[in-house]
Amino acid sequence: MKNKISIKITSKKLNMQTCYDLVSDDSSGGIAFFVGTVRNITKGKTVNQLDFSSYETMAEKEMKKIALQTFKKYDIIKIAIHHAVGELQIGDIPVIIAVSSAHRGAAFDACQYTIDTLKQTVPIWKKEHFDDGEVWVNTHP
């Protein structure tokens, strides 16, 4: 399982090509991605930037748990779960999920399951900055 899972939490810029290379495999018929981006508006308010913070040791442990669950639920070959922390600007990428499988259906389903589960269970928090203040979101888990 060691070469089939890539987990990363970093303050450096995330790279889609790196994730593609990590999940690429000769037995793969498809690779699905989810790429989260920092948008400039939420609930009608202009967003200036986001700050992500995490309890990294626990977050990495939970991300690995999600990856292992994904292998059990779906017929996948490899998975990468990468998340950025720190200050991110509009258009930056805070999260990349990449999944390879023999067939597209498993890759799509596994990718959606992974991002949905990550948002529900991984201790990564987001603060949105506006002209008139800031607010923490994703206050779970």
Image (cartoon, helix red, strand yellow):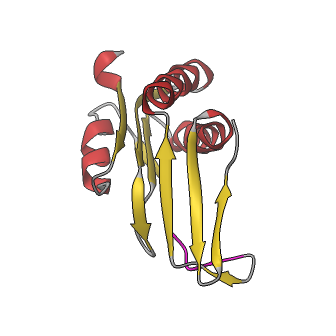
Q: Which residues are magenta?
A: 37-42
Q: Residue at x 30, y 47 (%)?
A: 20
User: On screen, 108 above or below 135?
Assistant: above
Q: Quadrant of residue 24?
A: top left
Nearest the viewer among 70 and 25 is: 70
User: On screen, 122 above or below 116?
Assistant: above
Q: Quadrant of the C terminus?
A: top right
User: Residue most toward the front?
Assistant: 133
Query: Quick check: can you spot residue 36?
Result: no
Picture coordinates of residue 16 (x, y %)?
Answer: 32, 55
Residue 22 magenta-highlighted = no
Query: Quick check: can you spot residue 113?
Result: yes
Q: Residue at x 63, y 75 (%)?
A: 133
Q: Is residue 20 left or right of residue 101?
A: left
Nearest the viewer among 4 and 105 is: 4
Q: Quadrant of the N terminus?
A: top left
Picture coordinates of residue 10 (x, y %)?
Answer: 33, 45
Picture coordinates of residue 92 (x, y %)?
Answer: 40, 68
Q: Quadrant of residue 111?
A: top right
Picture coordinates of residue 48 (x, y %)?
Answer: 51, 79
Q: Is residue 37 left or right of residue 43?
A: left
User: On screen, 55 above or below 128?
Assistant: above
User: Residue most toward the right?
Assistant: 43
Residue 41 magenta-highlighted = yes
Secondary structure mostly seen in magenta is: loop
